[in-house]
Image (spheres, helix red, strand yellow):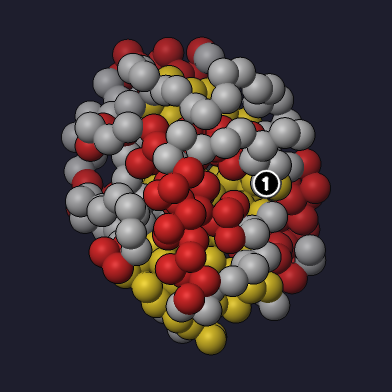
Amino acid sequence: MTRPRDTDFAAVSAATRMLLDRGLADPDVAVVLGSGLSSFVDGLGDVLVVPYSDIPGFPRTAVSGHRGAVVGCTLGGKRTLVLSGRVHHYEGLPPDDVTFGVRLAAQLGAGVLVITNASGGIDPGFDVGDLMLISDQIAAVSGSRKLPQSTFRMAGAYSERLKALAREAATDRKIRLREGVYMGSLGPTYETPAEIRMARLMGARAVGMSTVSEVQAAHSRGLDVLGIALLTNVPLPGRFHGTTHEEVLEAGRRGAGALVSLVSNTLERL
């Protein structure tokens, strides 16, 4: 696959040089953390933290529940670069900003991307706190979505090999792992009951406000992608209520331990 050239190549290159100077060279894996999952890095070994504010060109996170730092660590025996926090389209930011961290990880040499998010589960069998292996995605983000290359195939963006390893890890760690299609929308509003019905008709089993553009950027650069959604609310008819961001963050904090266990065990199998 021919990797596209970044439209802001100079900015990504400057950030890359800075992190190389800090000792964050040649990660095996990059992990993007969703809302409320910043505690993922707590207790990990061999940790080096670089705030986003120190990195030239790195967009600042403004949403609570996103720590806003690059964390170098060892996870599952692999050199890992954790992006603790992300920015979103609904913050009024362009695609280059939304995908900056993923493109930076690729420039540093990561070959695998583990992308996580806090999502609403829209399958009647799902419960708050479940982890869902993302099998595929539906991009429902409106507005300009330009990428450095006009068109590329998204079929197979989520690695079959990594999905198989995650299923093995879930069995080994006795973690209930759901599986399904993720729909990423623009946000920032939570889905209406009508939108949830539409998403279910389209085949989605979880909905959120992130991930799809980052996966597009990673796939276009040849990274193997593993996606895991933590279901922080289940906004279904009969159970629907006004979801709050505080509820999402609290569910994220409770579910971070299972996510670390699953990701770590999966990486050990690479």
Q: Vertically, is 185 above or below 266?
A: above
Q: Position of residue 185 (x, y in %)?
A: 38, 26
Say left or right for 60 vs 158: left
Residue in the foreground of this view, choosing between 205 and 43:
43
Q: Position of residue 76 (x, y in %)?
A: 67, 74
Number of disc labels: 1
Say left or right for 208 vs 112: left
Q: Vertically, is 98 above or below 185?
A: below
The quadrant of the picture occupied by the C terminus is bottom right
Residue in the foreground of this view, choosing between 250 and 78:
78
Specify the farthest residue to the bottom.
46
Crowd around label 1: few <14 · some 14–19 · many ≥20 (10 Å): many
Kindly identify the residue that appears in the image at 33 percent across and 53 percent down: 57
Give the residue number, with chain letter if any, for mark 1: 223
Can residue 121 be seen here? The reply is no
Q: Position of residue 227 (x, y in %)?
A: 58, 46
Kindly identify the residue that appears in the image at 49 percent across and 61 percent down: 16
Say left or right for 184 vs 157: left
Q: Vertically, is 168 above or below 235?
A: below
Residue in the foreground of this view, choosing between 225 and 7:
7
Kindly identify the residue that appears in the image at 62 percent across and 67 percent down: 27
The quadrant of the picture occupied by the N terminus is top right
Specify the farthest residue to the front.
10
Q: Vertically, is 148 above or below 221?
A: above
Kindly identify the residue that appears in the image at 68 percent across and 22 percent down: 153
Q: Amino acid at mark 1?
A: Leu
Q: Helix or strand or loop: what does disc 1 sit on?
A: loop
Q: Position of residue 154 (x, y in %)?
A: 65, 26
Can residue 159 be seen here? The reply is yes
Residue in the foreground of this view, choosing between 73 and 38:
73
